Amino acid sequence: MTRLLTFLGAALAAQFTLAGAAHAHPHVWVDGAITLNVTAGRLASITNIWTFDAPFSAYATQGLDTNGDHKLSEAELEPLSQTNMEALEPYHFFTYVRDAGAQVEFAAPEHYGLKMGKKRLSLTFTLPLREPVAFAPSTEIDVLDPEYFVAFSYPGKAPVAVKGEVAVKGEAAACAARYQPPKELDDQIMAQLAAIPADEHDLPEALQDAAQGLAHEFVVECK
């Protein structure tokens, strides 16, 4: 499989076969929240919390209740968490930081894990930047799946937070973050996406530019 997470791809292929669903991108819906971890006025890491839709959560966790108590512990979900991190890495964890136009790379993910709550699976993970960056007007932080297999939304009142030491050279500093949602796709693009078979994971080239416009953008200003 050339696309997305190992567990997403395998689970969805079977899920759509069983459900008889034949069409439509996206295939997975995620409600997100993001924390920008700051040290001395520089972005040091990013923590993502992704909560998957209930139908996918139910399918992805089948057979993981090994002790039969009808609950999913963190220990039972740990192998799936590891699989997620390994499979997301080639896709840059759907998280992009650009400083003056150059993409910033991440070190190995930290503090990752899955939890099940209210029939929805949530994945939390922290991405340390290899080199922390100072916030500037040219700093961009985006979350998206460029092929729109996964659709992200940030529905909370405060979908982005700034956490940590924001003082710069001993002087008091205040950092505030704002969220810029993507523009909605027009009806023609939505119709084209809906016509893509469920087992076709890669977007046609003609739709890739439209999907790139679906980035969820987070901007931080420190004073």
Image: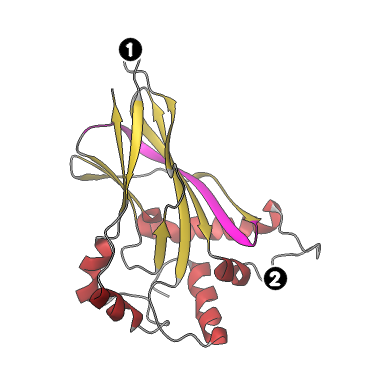
Please tell me whether the stretch drawn in magenta is mainly helix, strand or loop.
strand
Tag 1 residue = 171
Give the foreground label among 1 and 2. 1
Amino acid at the residue labelled 2:
Gly
Q: x, y percentage for residue 167?
A: 36, 18
Please say if 43 is above or below 29: above
Which residue of the protein is positioned furthest toward the top in this rendering? 170
Query: Tag 2, which secondary structure?
Result: loop
Left or right, 15 with respect to 68, comes to left
- Of mark 1 and mark 2, the one earlier in the sequence is 2
Q: Nearer the viewer, residue 142 or 192?
A: 192
Left or right, 193 with respect to 163, comes to left
Q: Decide whether residue 110 is among the magenta residues.
A: no
Q: Nearer the viewer, residue 84 or 22?
A: 22
Please say if 73 is above or below 17: above
Amino acid at the residue labelled 1:
Glu
Discs 1, 2 touching: Cβ within 8 Å: no
Residue 108 appears in the figure: no
Left or right, 209 with respect to 45, comes to left
Gap in angstroms between the C-alphas marked 1 and 2: 54 Å
Q: Which residues are magenta?
A: 117-136
Q: x, y percentage for residue 122?
A: 56, 55
Residue 161 appears in the figure: yes
Left or right, 87 with respect to 176, comes to right
Tag 2 residue = 63
